Image (spheres, rainbow, N blue to C red):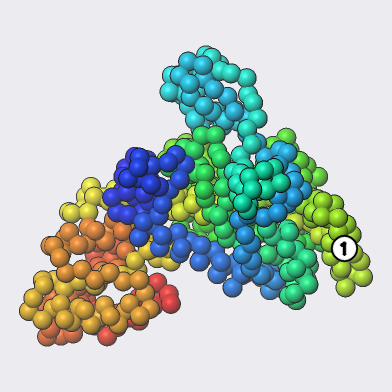
Amino acid sequence: MEDIVALCRRRGFVFQSSEIYGGINGFWDYGPLGVLLKKNLKDAWWNDIITCPDDGPDGKPLDMVGLDATIIMNPKVWVASGHVGGFSDPMVDCRECKSRFRADHMDEYPCPLKPSKKAGGFEKCSLTEAREFNLMFETYVGAIRNEDAKAYLRPETAQGIFANFDNVVNTSRVKVPFGIAQIGKAFRNEVTPRNFTFRSREFEQMEIEFFIRPDSAEEWYKFWRDTRYAWWKAIGLAGDNLTLREHDRDELAHYAKEGAGTSDIEYRFPFTAPGFGELEGVAHRTDYDLRQHAEHSGLGDKLKYFDQERNERYFPHVIEPSAGADRGTLAVLCEAYTPTPERKGSKVVMKFHPRLAPIKAAVFPLVNKEGMPEVAEKLYRQLRKKYSIEFDVKQSIGKRYARMDEAGTPYCFTVDGDTLTDNTVTVRDRDTASQDRIAIDKVEAFLAEKIGG
Ligand code: ATP
């Protein structure tokens, strides 16, 4: 994992927040390559969920709309949702080394005195009793700092969707079954932020609340669980590193006890191996949240949905696929990281799915003279109208290829002496390092076929 963190720092994927001041625990910044990677992941999600989703289990087009709610909401939202009363983690301290842990994640945060369960077990540590620690960040709205002005940074994006349920139903043509999706920041004052961006205090979620008739929960739960699992596979988390774990009944959240199910889509991160860490949770939340908001807002049955077909008013049930954009990006980084000791020059190749690659192609003149830079620049200008493209004239060609391998750029096009006579360029494939020649006027079509767009 240290190697991946070092590459992220060196190549500008992820930096420590406020690094020049010594950083701040649990906060991370995305550099020029990282911001493109994370944006490509979020764009892929938005496209595949809202713009061009699959058909539903009934074979009909999915009804999906987007939302962008605020981070700070009326604090009553968090009373209704149960977060003010109960969004806490059990916290324990080691009396010997003063480390602080989450009692329910002991294996994720081994005490330095007892590095692993195998090496003695936590029972040998002298631990304090667990005490509840609320994870919500507090702030004050307006000029006066008193209890009445207290507000919270949202700990999940979901409640912004529930609070706007009525607005969306009344202003768009959605009909149950339909979904509202949102990407946005969430904040949790995690007891022990660890494992790079995996557990941060500020992070981004990609959440869907899918509203359904109560009697169709089983079918829609299975649909979303399988669709979301297939999505992570399709963007490159293939193979043994991805798993779907159905929760046991005793693990279920209070609202899900009566539900059709809850499962986690998990990834085998280097720091969880041979185990897995959660990327996305898919839960049947029943009608819990809408009922809570109906009660706490005083709107009561007015928040019920009117089903014209059935001529019936009810609180729809909800299937919630809730994913982390940062954990997703981290999984993509870990999956892509491929040491290549056999290659000259490149020590590491980042094998991103072309859809997610921050830079889609690079254009190089073999040498920075003899008319090659001009031809290369013309090609670069043509391609960058459609794609994120790098143009580089410095250093040896081997070093430039190595830089692009570490950035995960799928293709490099090089203008050389032959280009000037036969109008062909070399195209180098990131994953195999093999090179072919193609006509310079076929480069754009080649990229369209390989990358899309
Ligand atoms: P965990 O058990 O790991 O704390 P959770 O079950 O509390 O996670 P959810 O509340 O279900 O997580 O949040 C949905 C998604 O948001 C998670 O699957 C994860 O991808 C992301 N997420 C949650 N907490 C964090 C965090 N502290 N840092 C980064 N991503 C997070």
Where residue 96 sits: x, y (%)?
47, 15
Where residue 364 sits: x, y (%)?
20, 71
Q: Is residue 374 left or right of residue 316?
A: left
Q: Residue at x 48, y 21 (%)?
A: 98
Pick the front one: 201 or 424: 201
**Picture quadrant of residue 188:** top right
Where residue 270 sits: x, y (%)?
42, 40
Q: Residues within 10 Å of mark 1 (few under 14, many from 20)?
A: few
Quadrant in which the N terminus appears = top left
**Picture quadrant of residue 157:** bottom right
Residue beneath label 1, please? 302
Q: Is residue 409 left or right of residue 70?
A: left
Q: Is residue 373 visible?
A: yes
Q: Which residue is most to the front?
A: 144
The local secondary structure at tag 1 comes to helix
Q: Which residue is most to the right?
A: 311
Count how many numbered circles sit on residues in the image.
Answer: 1
**Picture quadrant of residue 184:** bottom right
Pick the front one: 403 or 200: 200
Q: Is residue 264 visible?
A: no
Q: Which residue is most to the left?
A: 370
Q: Residue at x 64, y 26 (%)?
A: 131
Q: Residue at x 18, y 54 (%)?
A: 345
Where residue 250 sits: x, y (%)?
73, 35
Q: Is residue 95 left or right of residue 322?
A: left
Pick the front one: 191 or 401: 191
Residue 351 against residue 385 in the figure, above or below? above
Please state which amino acid type lies under the numbered disc 1: Lys
Q: Residue at x 17, y 54 (%)?
A: 344
Q: Is residue 39 left or right of residue 252?
A: left
Quadrant in which the C terminus appears = bottom left
